[in-house]
Image: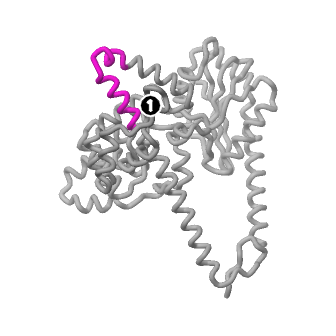
Amino acid sequence: MSDLVPGSGGVDAGPDYGGVHGDIVALLEAARHAAARSVNALMTASYWEIGRRMVEFEQAGQERAAYGQAVLKRLSVDLTQRFGRGFSERNLEQMRLFYLAWPPERISQTPSAKSAPTRISQTVSRESSVPSVPGVPIRTSAALSTLAQAFPLPWSAYVRLLSLKSEAARAFYETEALRCGWSVRQLDRQVNSQFYERIALSRNKAAMLQKAEAAGPGDAVTPEQALKDPFVLEFLNLKDEYSESDLEEALIQHLADFLLELGDDFAFVGRQRRLRLDDSWFRVDLLFFHRGLKCLLVIDLKIGKFSHADAGQMHMYLNYAREHWTKPGENPPVGLVLCTSKGHNEAHYALEGLPNKVMAAEYQTVLPDAKLLEAELDKTRRELEARRIGRDDAAGGQ
C-alpha cells in the first residue's frame, strides 16, 4: 500500500515517501537542536570574554580595582542603551564571576576543549583581534566560535553552577551534566536534592550515578524552549513573549482587549513581563496602569484553581513591582489573580498588606467587579474550547 501525502487530498506519493519524509523531519529536528546549542555556546563564550575584560581591567592596578564597581555600573547603562536588556549590574557581575570560576587553565581541561586543545588553548591565551574601533581590539567570530567549543552546557546551567559555593561540587555537577546529558531542569533538580552530598555518603555510588542518568517527566527541552530561554532572548535582543499553551495565550490576549474596552482608565503596559529573582525567572501575564488610581495593575492568569501559593506569588510580584516598576508619585501596585478550570472560576484581588487600607477599598470600588471578570473568563474559555473541538472534528473528517 503506497503512502499518501498529508494534506494533499489523498494524492499517492509512492512507496518511498515515508522514508524521505522521515529523513527530512530528522534533519530539521537535528538542525534546530544544533542551532539552539550554537546560540547558547556563542552566548556563553561572549559572556566569558566580557568577564575576562572586566577582570583584566581591575587587575591593571589598584586604582582601577578601587573604582571597578563604578565601571560596572557605567558599563551596565551603556551596554543596555546599545544592546537592550541582559546587561544589568547583576548580569555583568555574573559574567565576571564566570570568568573567575572558569579561568583559561580550567576550560582547557573540559571534555570539549580536550578534543581540540591546541585551538582552544590559543584562543583563550592569545588575542586574535581586528581593530574595528581604534585602540579597542575585539575577537574575530572564528576565534569566538572556537572558544564556544569549551562551553558545551547552556549559559543557564553555568549560572546555576555559579550559585554553588563549593568548587568541588561545581566541578562534580558540571561533569555529571555533561556525562548524563542533563537539561538545566535536571541539573537544578539534582542540585536541590543535594545529589553531590548524598553520593559522597553512599556505599553504592555506581548505582546512584547510573540512576541519575534517567530523565524525569518534563525534563526534555525542545529547541523552541531553548531559544525562548530568558538569557537567549536577552542576548539576541528579542521580545520575551511566549505562551505555555494556546488556551492561555488566547485568554491573556482576550483579557487585555476586554480591560481596554472597559474605558480609558486602563493603559496597557506590557504582557509576559519577565522578572528575575536570584537565579530564577518569573513572568507576569499582564501589566496595566490605572490612570484614575495612579497605580500599576499586575494580572496573573492560572489555568487551574486558586491556591495560597498563587496569592504568595502575587505578593512577591507586587513587592518587586513596587520596588522596580513603580515610579515616583504613583500608588502601590495592586494584583489580580485570575484562575480558571472546568466548573470553577475565581478572581482574587491581592489587597492584604497594602499600607493604605482606604486606598485598598478604593481599588475594590474602581477596578472591575470580580464576578464580571469571572463570567467573561468563563465565556471566553468555553468559546475557545468549542472552537478547538470544531477544528479537531473538521480535521478528523478529512
The N terminus lies in quadrant: bottom right
Residue located farthest toward the bottom when viewing the structure as drawn: 1
Question: Which residues are the magenta region?
Answer: 48-68
Residue denoted by label 1: 91
Q: How is the image coloured?
A: one colour
Which residue is at 31% across, 14% downward? 63
The C terminus lies in quadrant: bottom right
Q: Is-magenta flag for residue 284?
A: no
Comparing 182 with 28, the one in front is 28
Amino acid type at image mark 1: Asn
Q: Where is residue 271, by image quadrant? A: top right
Q: Position of residue 223 (x, y in %)?
A: 53, 54
Q: Position of residue 344 (x, y in %)?
A: 67, 46
Predominant secondary structure, magenta span? helix
Q: Secondary structure at mark 1?
A: helix
Comparing 82 with 339, the one in front is 82
Q: Is residue 180 above or below residue 324?
A: below
Q: Is residue 221 above or below residue 58?
A: below
Q: Position of residue 396 (x, y in %)?
A: 74, 70
Which residue is at 76% across, 79% downward? 11
Which residue is at 59% across, 40% downward? 306
Q: Position of residue 154 (x, y in %)?
A: 43, 47
Q: Is residue 120 above or below residue 392?
A: above
Q: Where is residue 393, by image quadrant? A: bottom right
Q: Is residue 362 above or below residue 124?
A: above
Q: Is-magenta flag for residue 55?
A: yes
Q: Where is residue 191, by image quadrant? A: top left
Q: Is residue 180 left or right of residue 228?
A: left
Comparing 375 with 224, the one in front is 224
- Mark count: 1
Q: Residues within 10 Å of mark 1 (few under 14, many from 20)?
A: some
Which residue is at 37% across, 30% downward? 53
